[in-house]
Image: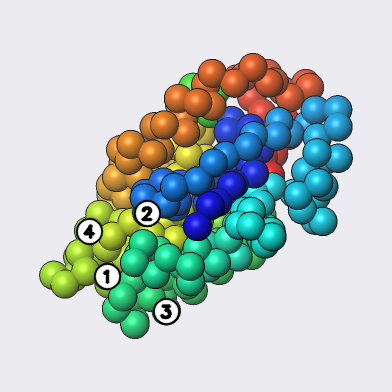
Amino acid sequence: MSLTLIIGNKNYSSWSLRPWLAMKVAGLAFDEKVIPLYEPGSREQVLKYSPAGKVPVLLDGDAAIWESLAILEYLAEKSPKAGLWPADPLARSHARVVANEMHGGFLPLRRNCPMNLWLPVKRRPVSDDAMDDVRRIDALWSDCRARFGQKADIGGPFLVGAIGAADAMYAQVVERLNSFGIQVSAASRAYMDAMMALPAWNEWRAAALKEPWVMQGNEPDWPLVRGL
């Protein structure tokens, strides 16, 4: 399986982080092509690979798969031994539920707390509706950890035990909550720390900090445009 992942610049493209991180932690070999977003001609470049005009896009021979969650499902089918979804049926169904909730929700948090890895970690003002999202995410993470993360047969520091697709879907939330200095419960904070300790996480971050692209009107201390 020869795979290529088309992604946006790592500093801003939160949706690109998801399949990239999943493939890295699952040990799936792939090439990557970075298309810097918010640059002249960016959309035209992306449209060469995706009719939706958005990243990420996974290329596998003649197949092109866009939308982060669809990419994760495609990879899970192609490489079942990668363990992107848990083997335990109950844990697997719950992992899919929480991944889909992330895919379709939490828009106020996304808008109010854009992904920008250049941000120094500090408390920043957050809107009331974004904080409603934070409370829901905090409860969701804590529930996952209590129900699945501590079970003897599937235990581990991530949402349903071992690292997988559900964690990849929430990776950009971990980054947002951390950089905006948003306080969460002890269980959720431990989960965030486990995510940010991943070698793949730090590989992405190190690459993002070396990127030359800065969005127009977007000073490093305060992002004015949300990541995709």
Q: Position of residue 105 (x, y in %)?
A: 62, 62
For marks 2 and 1, the one nearer the N-term is: 2
Taking depth in this image into account, of 126 and 217 the one nearest to the observer is 217
Q: Are marks 4 and 2 in contact (CB under 8 Å)?
A: no
For marks 4 and 2, the one nearer the N-term is: 2
Q: Do the residues labelled 2 and 1 touch (CB within 8 Å)?
A: no
Callout 2, which amino acid?
Ala
Circle 4 residue: 156
Local crowd at mark 1 within 10 Å, few (<14), some, or many (≥20)?
Answer: many
Q: What element carries label 4?
A: loop
Residue 26's mark? 2
For marks 3 and 1, the one nearer the N-term is: 3
For the residues labelled 2 and 3, the Cα–Cα distance comes to 19 Å
Circle 3 residue: 93
Residue 194's mark? none
Circle 1 residue: 148
